[in-house]
Image: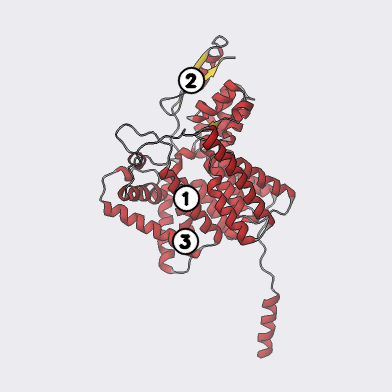
Protein backbone atom coordinates (compact mmCIF):
# COMPACT_ATOMS: atom_id res chain seq x y z
CA UNK A 1 0.00 0.00 0.00
CA UNK A 2 2.77 2.43 1.03
CA UNK A 3 4.86 1.36 -1.94
CA UNK A 4 1.94 2.07 -4.29
CA UNK A 5 1.52 5.60 -2.90
CA UNK A 6 5.26 6.19 -3.24
CA UNK A 7 5.18 5.14 -6.90
CA UNK A 8 2.17 7.40 -7.54
CA UNK A 9 4.02 10.37 -6.03
CA UNK A 10 7.04 9.61 -8.16
CA UNK A 11 4.94 9.53 -11.33
CA UNK A 12 3.30 12.83 -10.37
CA UNK A 13 6.68 14.45 -9.73
CA UNK A 14 8.03 13.44 -13.12
CA UNK A 15 4.88 14.44 -15.03
CA UNK A 16 5.64 17.31 -17.39
CA UNK A 17 3.35 20.37 -17.52
CA UNK A 18 1.02 20.51 -20.48
CA UNK A 19 2.43 22.48 -23.39
CA UNK A 20 0.22 25.14 -24.99
CA UNK A 21 -1.29 24.14 -28.31
CA UNK A 22 0.64 25.65 -31.20
CA UNK A 23 -1.52 26.48 -34.22
CA UNK A 24 -0.02 26.14 -37.66
CA UNK A 25 0.47 29.20 -39.84
CA UNK A 26 -2.43 28.00 -42.00
CA UNK A 27 -4.72 27.80 -38.99
CA UNK A 28 -3.73 31.31 -37.97
CA UNK A 29 -4.48 32.54 -41.49
CA UNK A 30 -7.85 30.77 -41.46
CA UNK A 31 -8.84 32.29 -38.10
CA UNK A 32 -7.70 35.74 -39.23
CA UNK A 33 -9.76 35.50 -42.42
CA UNK A 34 -12.75 34.27 -40.41
CA UNK A 35 -12.47 37.24 -38.03
CA UNK A 36 -12.03 39.55 -41.03
CA UNK A 37 -15.18 38.22 -42.67
CA UNK A 38 -17.23 38.46 -39.46
CA UNK A 39 -16.14 42.05 -38.84
CA UNK A 40 -16.90 42.98 -42.45
CA UNK A 41 -20.35 41.40 -42.11
CA UNK A 42 -21.16 43.87 -39.34
CA UNK A 43 -20.82 46.76 -41.80
CA UNK A 44 -21.11 45.33 -45.32
CA UNK A 45 -21.54 48.79 -46.86
CA UNK A 46 -17.87 49.41 -45.98
CA UNK A 47 -17.01 46.87 -48.68
CA UNK A 48 -19.84 47.16 -51.17
CA UNK A 49 -20.48 50.91 -50.93
CA UNK A 50 -17.30 52.38 -49.42
CA UNK A 51 -17.27 56.03 -48.36
CA UNK A 52 -15.02 58.19 -46.23
CA UNK A 53 -15.93 58.76 -42.59
CA UNK A 54 -14.95 62.01 -40.84
CA UNK A 55 -11.17 62.29 -40.49
CA UNK A 56 -10.65 59.37 -42.86
CA UNK A 57 -11.38 61.75 -45.72
CA UNK A 58 -11.29 65.19 -44.11
CA UNK A 59 -7.75 64.79 -42.75
CA UNK A 60 -5.88 61.61 -43.66
CA UNK A 61 -6.67 61.25 -47.35
CA UNK A 62 -6.98 64.99 -48.01
CA UNK A 63 -3.53 65.65 -46.53
CA UNK A 64 -1.96 62.74 -48.39
CA UNK A 65 -3.49 63.81 -51.70
CA UNK A 66 -2.94 67.57 -51.42
CA UNK A 67 0.44 67.63 -49.66
CA UNK A 68 1.95 64.29 -50.66
CA UNK A 69 2.05 61.23 -48.43
CA UNK A 70 5.57 61.84 -47.10
CA UNK A 71 5.07 65.42 -45.79
CA UNK A 72 1.62 64.45 -44.47
CA UNK A 73 3.16 61.56 -42.51
CA UNK A 74 4.90 63.98 -40.14
CA UNK A 75 1.91 66.23 -39.46
CA UNK A 76 0.46 66.07 -35.96
CA UNK A 77 -3.31 65.92 -35.54
CA UNK A 78 -5.23 66.68 -32.33
CA UNK A 79 -1.91 67.17 -30.54
CA UNK A 80 -0.17 63.91 -31.46
CA UNK A 81 1.14 61.88 -34.37
CA UNK A 82 -1.23 59.40 -36.04
CA UNK A 83 0.92 57.27 -38.30
CA UNK A 84 -1.38 54.32 -39.04
CA UNK A 85 -4.22 56.26 -40.74
CA UNK A 86 -1.70 58.35 -42.64
CA UNK A 87 0.02 55.22 -43.94
CA UNK A 88 -3.39 53.84 -44.93
CA UNK A 89 -4.11 57.08 -46.81
CA UNK A 90 -0.72 56.81 -48.53
CA UNK A 91 -1.65 53.29 -49.64
CA UNK A 92 -4.98 54.60 -50.97
CA UNK A 93 -3.09 56.93 -53.32
CA UNK A 94 -1.98 53.87 -55.30
CA UNK A 95 -5.51 53.09 -56.51
CA UNK A 96 -8.05 55.11 -58.52
CA UNK A 97 -9.71 57.82 -56.43
CA UNK A 98 -13.08 56.04 -56.50
CA UNK A 99 -11.50 53.09 -54.64
CA UNK A 100 -9.66 55.14 -52.01
CA UNK A 101 -12.35 54.77 -49.30
CA UNK A 102 -12.34 51.01 -49.85
CA UNK A 103 -8.59 50.82 -49.19
CA UNK A 104 -8.94 52.68 -45.89
CA UNK A 105 -11.86 50.46 -44.87
CA UNK A 106 -9.95 47.28 -45.73
CA UNK A 107 -6.99 48.42 -43.64
CA UNK A 108 -9.29 49.27 -40.72
CA UNK A 109 -10.98 45.84 -40.85
CA UNK A 110 -7.58 44.12 -41.00
CA UNK A 111 -6.46 45.95 -37.87
CA UNK A 112 -9.73 44.97 -36.15
CA UNK A 113 -9.12 41.30 -36.94
CA UNK A 114 -5.58 41.29 -35.51
CA UNK A 115 -6.33 41.02 -31.74
CA UNK A 116 -8.03 37.67 -32.27
CA UNK A 117 -4.90 36.27 -33.91
CA UNK A 118 -2.74 37.57 -31.08
CA UNK A 119 -4.97 35.91 -28.48
CA UNK A 120 -4.85 32.56 -30.28
CA UNK A 121 -1.05 32.57 -30.47
CA UNK A 122 0.62 30.14 -28.07
CA UNK A 123 2.58 33.03 -26.52
CA UNK A 124 -0.73 34.26 -25.08
CA UNK A 125 -1.33 30.98 -23.24
CA UNK A 126 -1.08 32.79 -19.89
CA UNK A 127 -4.62 34.02 -20.55
CA UNK A 128 -5.90 30.43 -20.49
CA UNK A 129 -6.21 27.41 -22.72
CA UNK A 130 -6.91 27.70 -26.44
CA UNK A 131 -10.67 27.28 -26.06
CA UNK A 132 -10.88 30.03 -23.46
CA UNK A 133 -8.77 32.38 -25.59
CA UNK A 134 -10.99 31.61 -28.57
CA UNK A 135 -14.00 32.66 -26.48
CA UNK A 136 -12.22 35.90 -25.54
CA UNK A 137 -11.53 36.53 -29.23
CA UNK A 138 -15.13 35.70 -30.14
CA UNK A 139 -16.52 38.17 -27.59
CA UNK A 140 -14.16 40.82 -28.93
CA UNK A 141 -15.28 40.30 -32.54
CA UNK A 142 -18.99 40.27 -31.62
CA UNK A 143 -18.83 43.02 -28.97
CA UNK A 144 -22.02 45.12 -28.84
CA UNK A 145 -22.07 48.91 -28.58
CA UNK A 146 -19.07 49.57 -30.84
CA UNK A 147 -20.56 51.07 -34.00
CA UNK A 148 -17.95 53.81 -34.23
CA UNK A 149 -15.17 51.22 -34.32
CA UNK A 150 -16.42 49.34 -37.38
CA UNK A 151 -14.25 49.72 -40.51
CA UNK A 152 -13.08 53.22 -39.55
CA UNK A 153 -9.33 53.74 -39.82
CA UNK A 154 -9.51 56.77 -37.52
CA UNK A 155 -10.70 54.50 -34.70
CA UNK A 156 -7.98 51.94 -35.40
CA UNK A 157 -5.70 53.62 -32.87
CA UNK A 158 -7.87 52.10 -30.12
CA UNK A 159 -7.55 48.63 -31.65
CA UNK A 160 -3.80 49.12 -32.04
CA UNK A 161 -3.64 49.83 -28.31
CA UNK A 162 -5.33 46.50 -27.60
CA UNK A 163 -2.86 44.79 -29.95
CA UNK A 164 0.09 46.44 -28.23
CA UNK A 165 -1.20 45.37 -24.82
CA UNK A 166 -1.59 41.77 -25.96
CA UNK A 167 2.00 41.86 -27.23
CA UNK A 168 3.25 43.23 -23.90
CA UNK A 169 1.34 40.55 -21.97
CA UNK A 170 2.60 37.73 -24.20
CA UNK A 171 5.71 35.67 -23.55
CA UNK A 172 8.99 36.40 -25.31
CA UNK A 173 9.06 35.47 -29.02
CA UNK A 174 11.30 32.55 -29.88
CA UNK A 175 12.70 33.85 -33.16
CA UNK A 176 13.88 37.10 -34.65
CA UNK A 177 10.81 37.25 -36.88
CA UNK A 178 8.49 37.40 -33.89
CA UNK A 179 10.63 40.05 -32.22
CA UNK A 180 10.67 42.17 -35.37
CA UNK A 181 6.87 41.90 -35.59
CA UNK A 182 6.47 42.95 -31.95
CA UNK A 183 8.75 45.96 -32.24
CA UNK A 184 7.06 47.03 -35.47
CA UNK A 185 3.64 46.78 -33.85
CA UNK A 186 4.76 48.73 -30.78
CA UNK A 187 6.30 51.42 -32.98
CA UNK A 188 3.15 51.73 -35.06
CA UNK A 189 0.96 51.88 -31.97
CA UNK A 190 3.22 54.36 -30.19
CA UNK A 191 3.25 56.65 -33.21
CA UNK A 192 -0.54 56.44 -33.59
CA UNK A 193 -2.14 58.34 -30.77
CA UNK A 194 -1.14 59.01 -27.17
CA UNK A 195 -1.92 55.53 -25.84
CA UNK A 196 1.73 54.61 -25.34
CA UNK A 197 1.56 56.85 -22.27
CA UNK A 198 -0.94 54.44 -20.68
CA UNK A 199 0.90 51.34 -21.88
CA UNK A 200 4.27 52.44 -20.49
CA UNK A 201 3.57 51.79 -16.76
CA UNK A 202 2.24 48.35 -17.69
CA UNK A 203 5.36 47.60 -19.71
CA UNK A 204 7.59 48.81 -16.85
CA UNK A 205 5.71 46.64 -14.33
CA UNK A 206 6.04 43.55 -16.55
CA UNK A 207 9.74 44.24 -17.09
CA UNK A 208 10.23 44.44 -13.32
CA UNK A 209 8.15 41.32 -12.66
CA UNK A 210 9.62 39.09 -15.35
CA UNK A 211 13.26 40.18 -15.10
CA UNK A 212 13.47 39.53 -18.82
CA UNK A 213 15.65 41.42 -21.28
CA UNK A 214 12.99 41.45 -23.98
CA UNK A 215 10.45 42.87 -21.55
CA UNK A 216 12.91 45.67 -20.81
CA UNK A 217 13.32 46.31 -24.55
CA UNK A 218 9.53 46.61 -24.86
CA UNK A 219 9.42 49.10 -22.01
CA UNK A 220 12.32 51.10 -23.41
CA UNK A 221 10.66 51.27 -26.83
CA UNK A 222 7.44 52.61 -25.34
CA UNK A 223 9.37 55.14 -23.23
CA UNK A 224 11.04 56.53 -26.37
CA UNK A 225 7.68 56.71 -28.15
CA UNK A 226 6.16 58.58 -25.20
CA UNK A 227 8.85 61.23 -25.64
CA UNK A 228 7.98 61.55 -29.33
CA UNK A 229 4.27 62.01 -28.62
CA UNK A 230 5.03 64.41 -25.76
CA UNK A 231 7.08 66.48 -28.21
CA UNK A 232 4.09 66.59 -30.59
CA UNK A 233 1.69 67.53 -27.81
CA UNK A 234 3.84 70.16 -26.11
CA UNK A 235 5.87 71.63 -28.98
CA UNK A 236 4.55 70.73 -32.43
CA UNK A 237 0.80 71.13 -31.84
CA UNK A 238 0.14 72.54 -28.35
CA UNK A 239 -3.26 73.68 -27.05
CA UNK A 240 -5.09 72.04 -29.93
CA UNK A 241 -7.61 69.93 -28.02
CA UNK A 242 -10.98 71.51 -27.20
CA UNK A 243 -11.64 72.80 -23.72
CA UNK A 244 -15.26 72.96 -22.60
CA UNK A 245 -16.94 72.73 -19.20
CA UNK A 246 -16.97 69.07 -18.18
CA UNK A 247 -20.05 69.28 -15.98
CA UNK A 248 -18.78 66.25 -14.07
CA UNK A 249 -20.95 64.85 -11.30
CA UNK A 250 -21.41 61.52 -9.51
CA UNK A 251 -24.88 61.23 -10.99
CA UNK A 252 -23.72 61.60 -14.60
CA UNK A 253 -20.79 59.26 -14.01
CA UNK A 254 -23.15 56.61 -12.66
CA UNK A 255 -25.45 57.01 -15.65
CA UNK A 256 -22.58 56.79 -18.14
CA UNK A 257 -21.02 53.77 -16.45
CA UNK A 258 -24.33 51.92 -16.11
CA UNK A 259 -25.82 52.82 -19.48
CA UNK A 260 -22.89 53.06 -21.88
CA UNK A 261 -20.70 50.32 -20.37
CA UNK A 262 -22.58 47.67 -18.39
CA UNK A 263 -26.05 47.77 -19.97
CA UNK A 264 -24.60 48.41 -23.43
CA UNK A 265 -22.38 45.34 -23.14
CA UNK A 266 -25.49 43.25 -22.46
CA UNK A 267 -28.17 44.94 -24.56
CA UNK A 268 -26.20 46.78 -27.21
CA UNK A 269 -26.65 50.37 -28.36
CA UNK A 270 -29.05 52.23 -26.05
CA UNK A 271 -30.01 55.65 -24.73
CA UNK A 272 -30.51 54.71 -21.08
CA UNK A 273 -27.88 57.15 -19.82
CA UNK A 274 -29.74 60.09 -21.36
CA UNK A 275 -33.15 59.09 -20.01
CA UNK A 276 -34.75 60.21 -16.78
CA UNK A 277 -35.03 56.76 -15.24
CA UNK A 278 -34.84 56.53 -11.43
CA UNK A 279 -31.27 57.08 -10.27
CA UNK A 280 -31.49 54.06 -7.98
CA UNK A 281 -31.72 51.87 -11.11
CA UNK A 282 -28.47 53.23 -12.54
CA UNK A 283 -26.80 52.99 -9.13
CA UNK A 284 -27.75 49.33 -8.80
CA UNK A 285 -26.47 48.50 -12.30
CA UNK A 286 -23.23 50.41 -11.71
CA UNK A 287 -22.57 48.69 -8.38
CA UNK A 288 -23.45 45.23 -9.69
CA UNK A 289 -21.28 45.60 -12.80
CA UNK A 290 -18.37 46.96 -10.81
CA UNK A 291 -18.69 44.06 -8.36
CA UNK A 292 -18.31 41.60 -11.24
CA UNK A 293 -15.22 43.41 -12.48
CA UNK A 294 -13.81 43.47 -8.93
CA UNK A 295 -14.34 39.71 -8.54
CA UNK A 296 -12.59 39.14 -11.85
CA UNK A 297 -9.70 41.36 -10.75
CA UNK A 298 -9.34 39.40 -7.53
CA UNK A 299 -9.49 35.93 -9.12
CA UNK A 300 -7.89 36.32 -12.55
CA UNK A 301 -4.32 36.23 -13.82
CA UNK A 302 -1.88 39.11 -13.92
CA UNK A 303 -2.58 39.65 -17.61
CA UNK A 304 -6.30 40.13 -17.07
CA UNK A 305 -5.74 42.37 -14.07
CA UNK A 306 -3.46 44.59 -16.12
CA UNK A 307 -6.05 44.75 -18.87
CA UNK A 308 -8.65 45.92 -16.35
CA UNK A 309 -6.21 48.57 -15.10
CA UNK A 310 -5.54 49.75 -18.66
CA UNK A 311 -9.28 49.90 -19.40
CA UNK A 312 -9.90 51.92 -16.24
CA UNK A 313 -7.13 54.39 -17.14
CA UNK A 314 -8.45 54.87 -20.67
CA UNK A 315 -12.03 55.25 -19.41
CA UNK A 316 -10.92 57.90 -16.93
CA UNK A 317 -8.88 59.74 -19.57
CA UNK A 318 -11.83 59.63 -21.98
CA UNK A 319 -14.06 61.28 -19.41
CA UNK A 320 -11.50 63.89 -18.36
CA UNK A 321 -10.14 64.95 -21.77
CA UNK A 322 -12.53 63.86 -24.52
CA UNK A 323 -12.35 65.37 -27.99
CA UNK A 324 -15.98 66.45 -28.26
CA UNK A 325 -17.71 69.70 -29.18
CA UNK A 326 -20.94 70.10 -27.21
CA UNK A 327 -23.53 72.65 -28.34
CA UNK A 328 -23.76 75.94 -26.43
CA UNK A 329 -25.13 75.54 -22.95
CA UNK A 330 -24.46 71.79 -22.79
CA UNK A 331 -21.60 70.35 -20.71
CA UNK A 332 -19.24 67.67 -22.01
CA UNK A 333 -20.50 64.91 -19.71
CA UNK A 334 -24.13 65.82 -20.44
CA UNK A 335 -23.44 65.43 -24.15
CA UNK A 336 -21.51 62.18 -23.69
CA UNK A 337 -24.34 60.73 -21.62
CA UNK A 338 -26.47 60.94 -24.74
CA UNK A 339 -23.95 59.36 -27.11
CA UNK A 340 -23.71 55.58 -27.22
CA UNK A 341 -21.53 53.14 -29.20
CA UNK A 342 -18.57 55.51 -29.48
CA UNK A 343 -14.85 54.74 -29.15
CA UNK A 344 -14.66 55.98 -25.56
CA UNK A 345 -16.77 53.06 -24.33
CA UNK A 346 -14.86 50.37 -26.23
CA UNK A 347 -12.24 49.38 -23.62
CA UNK A 348 -14.48 49.42 -20.52
CA UNK A 349 -17.20 47.52 -22.40
CA UNK A 350 -14.72 44.86 -23.52
CA UNK A 351 -13.27 44.68 -19.99
CA UNK A 352 -16.73 44.03 -18.55
CA UNK A 353 -17.56 41.41 -21.18
CA UNK A 354 -14.28 39.58 -20.60
CA UNK A 355 -14.84 39.82 -16.83
CA UNK A 356 -18.12 37.95 -17.24
CA UNK A 357 -16.31 35.17 -19.08
CA UNK A 358 -13.64 34.99 -16.37
CA UNK A 359 -16.28 34.83 -13.63
CA UNK A 360 -17.99 31.99 -15.46
CA UNK A 361 -14.90 29.90 -14.69
CA UNK A 362 -14.75 30.91 -11.01
CA UNK A 363 -15.54 28.49 -8.20
CA UNK A 364 -18.36 30.21 -6.28
CA UNK A 365 -21.59 28.85 -7.72
CA UNK A 366 -23.57 32.12 -7.34
CA UNK A 367 -20.90 34.01 -9.34
CA UNK A 368 -20.95 31.36 -12.06
CA UNK A 369 -24.75 31.46 -12.22
CA UNK A 370 -24.94 35.24 -12.48
CA UNK A 371 -22.19 35.35 -15.11
CA UNK A 372 -23.91 32.64 -17.16
CA UNK A 373 -27.21 34.52 -17.11
CA UNK A 374 -25.56 37.79 -18.11
CA UNK A 375 -23.60 36.13 -20.91
CA UNK A 376 -26.85 34.68 -22.23
CA UNK A 377 -28.35 38.16 -22.09
CA UNK A 378 -25.30 39.44 -23.96
CA UNK A 379 -26.22 37.09 -26.82
CA UNK A 380 -29.32 39.24 -27.29
CA UNK A 381 -27.15 42.35 -27.41
CA UNK A 382 -24.81 40.72 -29.94
CA UNK A 383 -27.67 39.76 -32.26
CA UNK A 384 -29.36 43.13 -31.85
CA UNK A 385 -26.15 45.09 -32.44
CA UNK A 386 -24.50 42.81 -34.99
CA UNK A 387 -25.02 44.82 -38.15
CA UNK A 388 -24.07 48.46 -37.82
CA UNK A 389 -26.25 51.04 -39.59
CA UNK A 390 -24.89 51.83 -43.07
CA UNK A 391 -23.55 55.28 -43.79
CA UNK A 392 -25.58 57.71 -45.88
CA UNK A 393 -25.03 57.08 -49.56
CA UNK A 394 -23.34 60.24 -50.82
CA UNK A 395 -22.62 58.69 -54.23
CA UNK A 396 -18.88 59.00 -53.97
CA UNK A 397 -18.32 57.67 -57.50
CA UNK A 398 -20.39 60.57 -58.91
CA UNK A 399 -18.39 63.01 -56.80
CA UNK A 400 -15.17 61.59 -58.24
CA UNK A 401 -16.46 62.15 -61.80
CA UNK A 402 -17.25 65.75 -60.90
CA UNK A 403 -13.78 66.15 -59.46
CA UNK A 404 -12.05 64.65 -62.48
CA UNK A 405 -13.99 66.99 -64.79
CA UNK A 406 -12.83 70.07 -62.87
CA UNK A 407 -9.95 72.18 -64.29
CA UNK A 408 -6.46 71.67 -62.84
CA UNK A 409 -5.85 73.76 -59.74
CA UNK A 410 -9.51 73.74 -58.69
CA UNK A 411 -10.31 72.99 -55.05
CA UNK A 412 -13.27 70.60 -55.02
CA UNK A 413 -15.26 69.96 -51.85
CA UNK A 414 -16.65 66.45 -51.23
CA UNK A 415 -19.37 65.87 -48.63
CA UNK A 416 -18.47 62.97 -46.34
CA UNK A 417 -20.13 61.19 -43.44
CA UNK A 418 -21.23 62.17 -40.83
CA UNK A 419 -23.43 65.10 -41.79
CA UNK A 420 -21.56 68.39 -41.81
CA UNK A 421 -18.13 66.95 -42.62
CA UNK A 422 -16.35 67.65 -45.91
CA UNK A 423 -13.16 66.74 -47.74
CA UNK A 424 -11.38 69.23 -49.98
CA UNK A 425 -9.08 67.99 -52.72
CA UNK A 426 -7.00 70.12 -55.06
CA UNK A 427 -7.35 68.97 -58.68
CA UNK A 428 -3.87 68.22 -59.97
Q: Residues within 10 Å of mark 1 (few under 14, many from 20)?
A: some
Secondary structure at numbered mark 1: helix
Q: Nearer the viewer, mark 2 or mark 1?
A: 1
Q: Position of residue 55 (x, y in %)?
A: 50, 30
In front: 380, or 19?
19
Q: Position of residue 144 (x, y in %)?
A: 44, 46
* Residue 138 seen by the camera: yes
* Residue 190 seen by the camera: no
Q: Position of residue 224 (x, y in %)?
A: 62, 44
Whichever of labels 2 and 1 marks the residue nearer the N terminus, that label is 1
> Disc 3 versus disc 2: distance between alpha carbons?
48 Å
Disc 2 target residue: 414
Q: Position of residue 219 (x, y in %)?
A: 62, 51
Q: Residues within 10 Å of mark 3 (few under 14, many from 20)?
A: many
Residue pictured at 29% horizontal, 53% vertical:
281
In front: 15, or 62?
62
Whichever of labels 3 and 1 marks the residue nearer the N terminus, that label is 3
Disc 1 target residue: 313
The answer to whether residue 366 is left or right of residue 105 is left
Whichever of labels 3 and 2 marks the residue nearer the N terminus, that label is 3
Residue placed farthest to the bottom in the image?
Answer: 1
> Disc 3 versus disc 1: distance between alpha carbons?
17 Å
> Disc 2 versus disc 1: distance between alpha carbons?
37 Å
Disc 3 target residue: 296
The answer to whether residue 77 is left or right of residue 180 is left
The answer to whether residue 275 is left or right of residue 203 is left
Residue pictured at 68% horizontal, 77% vertical:
13
Which quadrant of the view contains residue 82?
top right
Amino acid sequence: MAAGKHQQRARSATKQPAQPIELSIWMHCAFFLLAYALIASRRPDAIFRPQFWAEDGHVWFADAYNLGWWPALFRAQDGYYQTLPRLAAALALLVPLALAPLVLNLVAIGVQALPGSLLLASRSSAWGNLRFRALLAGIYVALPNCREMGAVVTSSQWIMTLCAFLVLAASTPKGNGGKLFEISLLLLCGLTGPFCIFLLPIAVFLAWKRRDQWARIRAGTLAALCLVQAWALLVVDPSVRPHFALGASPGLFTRILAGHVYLAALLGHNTFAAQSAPFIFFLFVALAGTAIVAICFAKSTVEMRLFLVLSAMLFAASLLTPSVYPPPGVSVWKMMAGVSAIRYWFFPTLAFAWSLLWCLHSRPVPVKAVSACLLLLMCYGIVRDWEHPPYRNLHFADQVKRFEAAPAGTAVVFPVNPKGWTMQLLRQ
